[in-house]
Image (cartoon, grey):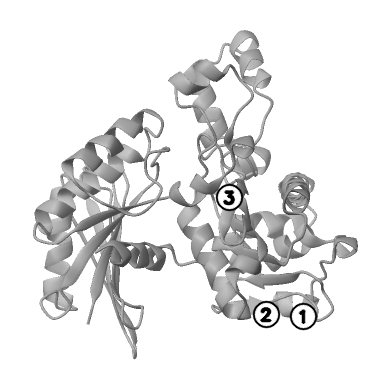
Amino acid sequence: MTAVLVINSGSSSFKYQLIEMDAETTLARGLVERIGADESHVTHEVVSQNGSEEYEQARSIRNHTEGFAVMLDAFREHGPSLDEHAPVAVGHRVVHGGKRFFEPTIITDLVRINIEDLAEIAPLHNPANVQGIEAAQKSFPDIPHVAVFDTAFHQTLPPAAYTYAIDKDVAEKHRIRKYGFHGTSHKFVSEEAARFLERDIADLNQIVLHLGNGASMTAVRGGESVETSMGFTPLEGLVMGTRSGDIDPAVLVHLHHKANLSVDELDDLLNRQSGIYGLSGLKDMRDLTDEANEGNDTARAALDVYVHRLKQYLGGYFFQLGRVDVIAFTAGIGENSAQVRAEALAGLENFGVKVDAARNEQRSHDTRVISADDSDVTVLVVPTNEELEIARQTLSVV
């Protein structure tokens, strides 16, 4: 068996998954959270053909290195055995690769230094990714560690798409351009859509909607990203759970001068107090649609804003691609909210998009078609699997 351990590290937590790559099946997954708090929480789930068993514990974990030791204890105590399923490599999700990293990369001291340097434009993510890398290398010192970058899939963006219309010298000095995010998910979903339809991805024009608490949309031509909604940071683009998405930048100047909001307060406003939450006081799309359907005007207005932005980007990507063969929904909202999918595509029949209402309402964990038989554009729901994509890319370089 060939196993890969996938690590997704945050500042006070990390998720992990052990994947057997011959059959691409998950053997175990887990979460170590609240690292550095008085009481940390550990979840370890063992997956088998007969189902899964989950084990939990609460204990003090001071840092990521201790967290990895706890993870190894969970494997020893509950399985599967890392002796029998020894990983050949560890794959790390790294959020920002800037324009330096455009493919999965074996982590050397120089690569780690470059990831740390990019923390200047990803201060919430890259430092946490580095913590996970350093802790994992201590736990697994004898196997390769590979960085898989969220931004890498979007390195194919043409200059016209990634360039902001500001002073070019200022932009170059401060590395200001569109980078795009969720690339691992967009790559996996566009490739899975082609596989499911038994089509050559090189012949397909696709629009992928990754709709979760964070949300982004990507136009994919022949398997390559040619436009995407997130930009220099994951704040640009669609309306999200707590993020505003697109906003006139002059609003920030106005709020600074008129409301005396500091830079930190503006950052908090746009990233944590806006989006669906800012409009409605609700953070979960299930709660928002329930409230909207029960006649809550505030919730209905927030849902309208959310859907309006989806349609705006869909229309733009139709024109950028010239022809659309596939629209694919993924992530928590995209996979589970039939109402959001239906409202986002309502009225697009003249563009060849027809949703079959009964198919759209069906729930499944599998890739499925929700468009009508006579729809020119095939509409799919494709469950994303970023961990598997990271494992695949990790294996490709080791």
Question: Front-most of 270 and 118?
Answer: 118
Type of amino acid under label 1: Ala
Mark 3 neighbour class, 10 Å CA radius: few under 14, some 14 to 19, many 20 or more: many
The residue most toward the top is 257
The residue lying furthest to the bottom in this view is 50
Q: Vertical placement of 150 versus 197: above or below?
A: above
Label 3 sits on residue: 215
Q: Which residue shows up at 50% across the image and 15% down it? A: 262
Disc number placed over residue 34 in the picture, else none: none
In this rendering, is residue 164 above or below 359?
A: above
Circle 3: residue type: Ala
In the depicted view, which residue is nearer to us: 347 or 68?
Answer: 347
Q: Which residue is mark 2?
A: 362
The Cα–Cα distance between marks 1 and 2, rounded to whole angstroms, is 7 Å
Image coordinates for residue 182, horizontal then vertical, percent = 49, 52
Q: Quadrant of the N terminus?
A: bottom left
Image position of 99 with respect to 17: above or below: above
Residue at 56% x, 31% y: name it: 270
Mark 2 is surrounded, within 10 Å at the Cα level, by few (under 14), some (14 to 19) or many (20 or more) other residues, namely: few
**Residue displayed at 67% across by 30% down:** 247
Which amino acid, by three-letter code, is at mark 2?
Answer: Gln
Q: Quadrant of the C terminus?
A: bottom left
Secondary structure beneath dot 3 equals strand
Circle nearer the N terminus (1, 3): 3
Can I make out residue 26 in this image?
yes
